[in-house]
Image: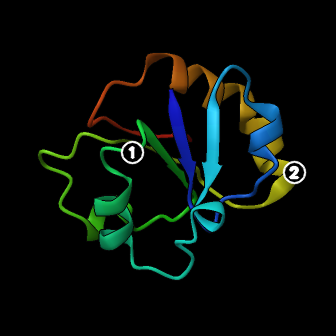
Amino acid sequence: MKVLLDECTPHVLKRLLTGIDITTVQEMGWSGITNGALLRRAEGQFDVLITSDQNWKYQQNLVGVQIAIIQLPTNQVPKIIALAPAVQASLNIIQPGEFIAIP
């Protein structure tokens, strides 16, 4: 499984999630691009996008999109660390095109 961490998502997840190929937006050289452009670039290269941006579901038309999206409720590192098991569990069950919001 190939996972892309959005620009606003703490990189601490890279070391907390196991058995997953994780790349950041910054590593791809995609910093600063809009969500729509990011979605188009990521689709076909990644299976899942993890973001803490709360606007994805409302600003993007996700109908027919094949990349799955996991939305985190915050980008605060201590909270992200605490949510890592829930993110790992979501990665184990998420299907192409699915949107999961971690509470």
Q: Position of residue 25 (x, y in %)?
A: 58, 63
Q: Residue at x 82, y 48 (%)?
A: 12
Amino acid type of the residue that numbered disc 2 sits on in the rendered structure = Pro
Q: Amino acid at mark 1?
A: Gln
Q: Is residue 97 above or below residue 29?
A: above
User: For residue 87, which quarter of the picture?
Assistant: top right
- 2 or 1: tag closer to the N-terminus: 1
Mark number, residue 45: 1
Kindly identify which numbered label has been placed on residue 78.
2
Closer to the observer: label 2 or label 1? 1
Q: Quadrant of residue 58?
A: bottom left
Q: CA distance from mark 2 to mark 1?
A: 29 Å
| Neighbourhood count class around disc 1 (C-alpha, 10 Å): few under 14, some 14–19, many 20 upward | few
Q: Secondary structure at mark 2?
A: helix
Q: Which residue is more in the foreground, 58 or 97? A: 97
Residue ID at (52%, 72%)? 30
The x and y percentages for residue 80 are 76, 47
Q: Secondary structure at mark 1?
A: loop
Q: x, y (%) of residue 26? A: 64, 67
| Image mark for residue 29 | none
At which x and y percent is residue 17?
73, 30
78 horizontally vs 54: left or right: right
